[in-house]
């Protein structure tokens, strides 16, 4: 029996992971597509006049087997992949792409949608229904419904090819990340490294039946090595390996794939009547156009560059004074920044980590969500998971009603991609009078507990956890009617507001007091550390801003103009980085070939949105600070106008309802120390 094609009989309708076999996925996808296709045919064949209910709403609630199968499968593809899953992904992606196009290019279906859209002013729709109708209509018009047949055929070919290429891109990055190991046998080479990092490297070596210590390109291994290892030559080896991922002229090289993806995206935009891929994407974003994004990035660059150059000069002088170094290379940045930070603030991650035991930090996030939004998190053992490291929680409101199911998956392993993300197994929606609650997950890569130590987080990892938890709250507190407008289904440059605003609590004494307790003694983090965390929050913010801007500019470089003249990824990148470059270039390294956000994830023409959302989050948090960071009324405004509303209305309308005004960039510049307070 294939569980994926049945109605789930599990607690709260959760995914029955242990009963699903890998070979179940392909038949479930085929069956799901078949049922969804039949539902579309029924809508088209309906002899009645097209109405909002029999056309738009019917489409919105269709395809649930396909939706559930896709969410389970692609989440496993990111968090628990293997050769079989990767093979299925390659086979199924073109099928899904083709089905998507069959719907979007269905002339008869579009005519029904258009008939409803044309009389929208007479239908007395709610704000959410109006948004859904507009989205459905644009889903057709923006994706080729009005095109002549030959162009529709070309569009299908492009989409099929793009879905395969982006999968291949991600698999190459994962293969290259997994392929590299820095194997150390001389204990002297561990100088400077924290005890926990050494212990984790030793355990990894033992699991691989090797002597000594093994370091990898996974973040919990790579980042501490680059930050603390005194051996500059080994830092260089590791950094070069990291920067050369999928750019080594081997079977996993992504250079040609990057060029193909950029060119196909541009062609696709042209076929649809847009000047560039960025013009196509940004039409449905707060930023609206490539010109507006570029001007936003340039404006920030003008303000950040003087600060960044000053910070870089200070860092260079510090490295020269400390170790006689004449100039800094990329593998020196994190190392000397950490040393300078320790000198200026007498604060380093090793001092802070004992106060940030993973379980305490997670409980802190839960407590803060309780204080702000009245949520209670209770760990439960009777919900199925896809890996023993995953923990599950029932989330309830103050009256004891179920709000959401929450999954947390925190440790790196083979088959799990790097980084941190929030995802969902089931959206929230209201159907037949029942408010179906969402199933939300956050996935991170933190240091695993060892025999002698629990998982202790760096402060940066603390903010990462809070960031993903902010996304999770956006999913959990959703309260909309239609699944496609629920939770994080919002404009891409708005989606980072709930996550980034959540990070602010990590810097507040009142919030830290709730969870930052020493894992052995239970004592609260000393006030002087909190003061220093706050003081150091804007340490090298100029350099950090330049780094983010460089990624945003590279993204716009690939997507806001015709890429057909680009023949060499490295040469192109070097041009794009010219305005933001601080460190000397490293020959044989490239950013684009492993830039998964834009070539595999959904961030193409959208990387700027991190900075865009920072403006929103700095402005929003300023409002919390004015009233008190746990002020119930402000939290209710944020929940009612932002977190629960999903994509039901234009984000600027929602934001102004919460804040009473448009966001002001000054709040961000002030917080970043790039503007006098």
Image (cartoon, rainbow, N blue to C red):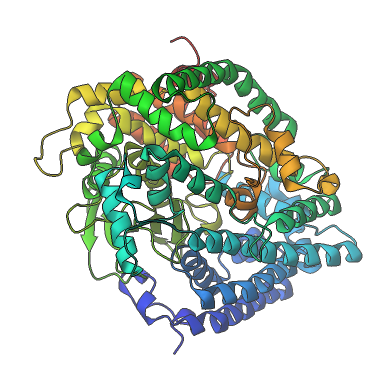
Q: Looking at the image, is 463 positioned above or below residue 297?
A: below
Residue at the farthest left position: 521
Residue depicted at 52% across the width and 75% down the height: 83
Question: Is residue 627 visible from the viewing direction of this image?
Answer: no
Foreground: 661 or 677?
Answer: 677
Foreground: 505 or 245?
Answer: 245
Would you say 392 lies left or right of 158 here? left
Residue depicted at 50% across the width and 16% down the height: 674
- From the top left corner, tell me how far across and down residue 129 is, in percent: 59, 50
Tell me which corner region of the image, top left, top right, bottom left or bottom right, holds residue 253.
bottom right
How many numbered dots are placed on residues in this image? 0
- From the top left corner, tell me how far across and down residue 519 is, in percent: 15, 44
Foreground: 222 or 588?
Answer: 588
Foreground: 109 or 359?
Answer: 359
Residue depicted at 50% across the width and 52% down the height: 486
Would you say 461 lies left or right of 236 here? left
Residue at the farthest bottom position: 1
- From the top left corner, tell me how far across and down residue 325 is, in percent: 48, 25
Q: Quadrant of the C terminus?
A: top left
- From the top left corner, tell me how far across and down residue 171 is, in percent: 58, 64
Q: Quadrant of the N terminus?
A: bottom left
Q: Looking at the image, is 652 positioned above or below residue 599?
A: above
Question: Is residue 108 visible from the viewing direction of this image?
Answer: yes
């Amino acid at each position: 029996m294939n569980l994926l094609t049945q109605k789930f009989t599990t607690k709260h309708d959760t995914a029955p992971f242990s009963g699903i076999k890998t070979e179940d996925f392909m038949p479930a996808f085929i069956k799901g597509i078949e049922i969804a296709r039949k539902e579309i045919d029924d809508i088209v064949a309906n002899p009645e006049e097209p109405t909002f209910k029999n056309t738009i709403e019917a489409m919105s609630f269709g395809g649930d087997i396909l939706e559930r199968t896709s969410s389970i499968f692609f989440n496993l593809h990111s968090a628990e992949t293997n050769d079989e899953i990767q093979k299925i992904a390659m086979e199924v992606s073109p099928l899904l792409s083709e089905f998507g196009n069959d719907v979007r290019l269905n002339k008869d279906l579009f005519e029904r949608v258009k008939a409803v859209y044309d009389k929208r002013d007479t239908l007395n729709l709610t704000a959410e229904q109006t948004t859904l109708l507009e989205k459905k209509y644009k889903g057709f018009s923006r994706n080729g419904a009005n095109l002549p047949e030959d162009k529709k055929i070309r569009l299908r070919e492009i989409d099929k090819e793009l879905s395969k290429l982006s999968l291949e891109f991600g698999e190459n990055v994962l293969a290259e990340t997994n392929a590299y190991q820095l194997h150390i046998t001389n204990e002297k080479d561990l100088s400077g490294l924290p005890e926990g990092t050494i212990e984790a490297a030793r355990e990894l070596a033992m699991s691989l039946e090797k002597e000594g210590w093994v370091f990898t390109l996974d973040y919990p291994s790579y980042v501490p090595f680059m930050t603390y290892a005194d051996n500059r030559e080994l830092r260089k080896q590791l950094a070069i390996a990291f920067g050369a991922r999928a750019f080594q002229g081997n079977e996993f090289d992504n250079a040609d794939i990057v060029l193909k993806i950029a060119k196909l995206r541009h062609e696709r935009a042209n076929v649809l009547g847009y000047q560039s891929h960025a013009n196509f994407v940004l039409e449905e974003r707060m930023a609206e156009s490539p010109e507006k994004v570029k001007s936003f990035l340039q404006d920030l660059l003008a303000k950040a560059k003087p600060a960044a150059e000053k910070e870089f000069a200070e860092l260079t002088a510090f490295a020269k004074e400390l170790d006689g170094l004449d100039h800094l290379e990329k593998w020196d940045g994190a190392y000397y920044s950490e040393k300078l930070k320790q000198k200026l603030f007498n604060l380093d991650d090793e001092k802070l980590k004992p106060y940030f035991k993973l379980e305490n930090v997670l409980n802190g996030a839960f407590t803060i969500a309780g204080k702000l939004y009245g949520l209670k998190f209770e760990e439960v053992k009777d919900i199925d998971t896809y890996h023993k490291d995953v923990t599950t929680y029932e989330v309830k409101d103050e009256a004891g009603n179920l709000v959401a199911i929450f999954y947390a998956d925190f440790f790196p392993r083979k088959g799990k991609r790097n980084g941190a993300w929030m995802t969902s197994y089931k959206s929230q929606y209201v159907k037949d009078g029942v408010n179906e609650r969402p199933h939300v997950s956050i996935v991170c890569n933190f240091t695993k507990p060892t025999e002698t130590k629990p998982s202790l987080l760096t402060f940066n990892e603390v903010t990462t956890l809070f960031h993903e938890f902010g996304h999770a709250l956006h999913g959990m507190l959703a309260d909309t009617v239609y699944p496609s407008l629920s939770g994080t289904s919002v404009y891409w440059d708005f989606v980072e507001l709930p996550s980034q605003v959540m990070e602010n609590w990590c810097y507040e004494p009142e919030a830290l007091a709730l969870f930052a307790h020493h894992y052995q003694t239970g004592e609260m983090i000393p006030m002087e550390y909190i003061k220093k965390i706050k003081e150091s929050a804007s340490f090298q913010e100029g350099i950090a801003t330049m780094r983010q801007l460089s990624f945003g500019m590279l993204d716009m470089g690939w997507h806001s103009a015709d890429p057909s003249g680009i023949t060499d990824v490295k040469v192109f990148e070097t041009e794009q980085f010219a305005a933001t470059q601080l460190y000397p270039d490293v020959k044989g390294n490239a950013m684009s070939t492993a830039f998964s956000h834009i070539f595999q994830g959904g961030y193409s023409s959208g990387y700027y949105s991190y900075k865009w959302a920072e403006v929103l989050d700095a402005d929003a948090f300023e409002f919390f600070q004015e009233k008190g960071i746990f002020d119930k009324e402000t939290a209710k405004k944020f929940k009612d106008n932002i977190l629960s509303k999903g994509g039901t209305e234009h984000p600027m309308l929602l934001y102004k309802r919460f804040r009473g005004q448009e966001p002001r960039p000054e709040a961000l510049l002030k917080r970043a120390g790039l503007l006098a307070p």
